[in-house]
Image (tube, rainbow, N blue to C red):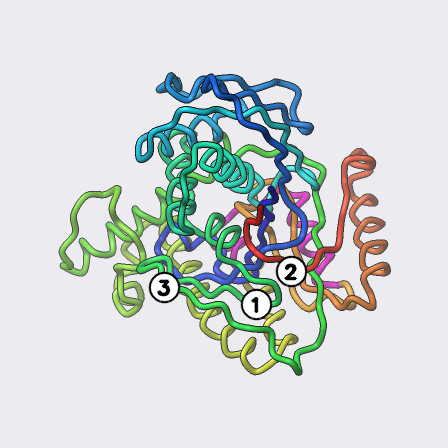
Amino acid sequence: MFCPYRVSPLGAHIDHQLGIVNGFAIDKGIHIAYGTKHNGVVELQSLNFPKRAQFHVLSIPDNKAGDWADYLRGAAKKLGEKYPLRHGISAVIEGSLPIGGLSSSAAVTIAFLCALARVNSVVLDEWEIILMAKAAENEYVGVNCGKLDQCCEVLSKKDHLLYLDCQDDLYDLIPKPDNMRPFKIAVFFSGLDRTLVNSAYNLRQDECKAAAYSLMAFSGMEYGKFKESRLRYVPKPVFEEYKEKIPLPFRKRANHYFSEMERVKKGLECWNNADLENYGKLIFESGRSSIENYECGCDELISLYNIMCETDGIFGGRFSGAGFKGCCMALIDPEKSEEIQKRIESEYLKLYPSLEGKYSSCVCDLSNGVMS
């Protein structure tokens, strides 16, 4: 079974605020080879991590262990809450790219969830897969992700743009126009290790919620529990009128949200008009706002972004994923892919020579969602 990784050209950091997003699945991802264990035991070995995971489908610990297999325990727990589980699996999991920025955690979770369901004769629809995988990350692992990752990795269709509204789950798969210039997805890995649980990922979400909560209070809007606050519930005119009253960090997070929503809408027009150049410019703008307003990224990732901005043949690019360490993605001209990879590597390693041997890059095509 194969579950692809994903990239999101536009819609950075707004899925958890119920925004609208773009996404693609790529032809690199997680492969899982598995067989049924009739005694209910789950045994998994990852070719990317040294520790083997082992647990029983009927006795999953309530608390996470703090290792990579927490995603699998969480997925099994969510599946078992809805369907009776009798069988476990013996499996080997392999990721085809370095960890960080392509939602490998969601891909691992989805691939395992589908395999475990299959050996227990459980047929999951697409939204069951999405919501169970998301709940495993949110409720068991403790990463407050939105639906973007899971939706891209389940719903995507090759050579189509996924356009998703995270408020009502309405989505469209928009075919690549016949007259659009060809492009591929390039991924540039910083060479730094990354973990969302210990990054500022959850903090940024709380800042977005605080911005929404404050703006609703200042404007006299009705508001409920803080944890249920989202910027999607705040009309933009309310933000414009009351933004000076909220703390600067909250204001900057909200500014990113509202400007990114506009970029997604403009991006849809560009895609439908086969305007890859302006679609790419919007991706670069998204990257700049992620740095200046959302304030994610580290020196290395920001350097990668700046190098991409100055590299011929890149239509647009930004951080991929949460943007605290992982990688950058870009839409590139396939005819210039070799020159692009050489230039990015050369310029990046001039700045960070200690990352030689850790930095890497690859060029990918678009893919369908999870496949058996």
Q: Are marks 1 and 3 in contact (CB under 8 Å)?
A: no
Q: Which residues are magenta?
A: 288-310
Between residue 164 and residue 250, name the one nearer to us: 164
Residue 192 visible in the shown view:
yes
User: Which residue is found at the position 28% from the left and 53% from the top?
Assistant: 212
Q: Are marks 2 and 3 in contact (CB under 8 Å)?
A: no
The part of the image, by quadrant, that contains residue 281 is bottom right
Q: Are marks 1 and 2 in contact (CB under 8 Å)?
A: yes
Residue 42 left/right relative to 317: left
Residue 24 left/right relative to 307: left
Q: Is residue 283 magenta?
A: no
User: Disc 2 residue type?
Assistant: Leu
Name the quarter where the N terminus is drawn: top right
User: Which residue is found at the position 39% from the left and 29% from the top?
Assistant: 140
Between residue 75 and residue 339, name the one nearer to us: 75
Badge 2 element: strand
Mark 1 or 3, nearer chain start = 1
User: Which residue is found at the position 50% from the left and 48% from the top?
Assistant: 295
User: Disc 1 residue type?
Assistant: His
Task: Give the answer, above or below, for where 230 lies relative to 38.
Answer: below
The residue identified by callout 1 is 160
The residue identified by callout 3 is 170
Mark 1 or 2, nearer chain start = 1
The residue identified by callout 2 is 366
User: Which residue is found at the position 49% from the left and 75% from the top?
Assistant: 266
Residue 204 visible in the shown view:
no
Q: Is residue 293 magenta?
A: yes
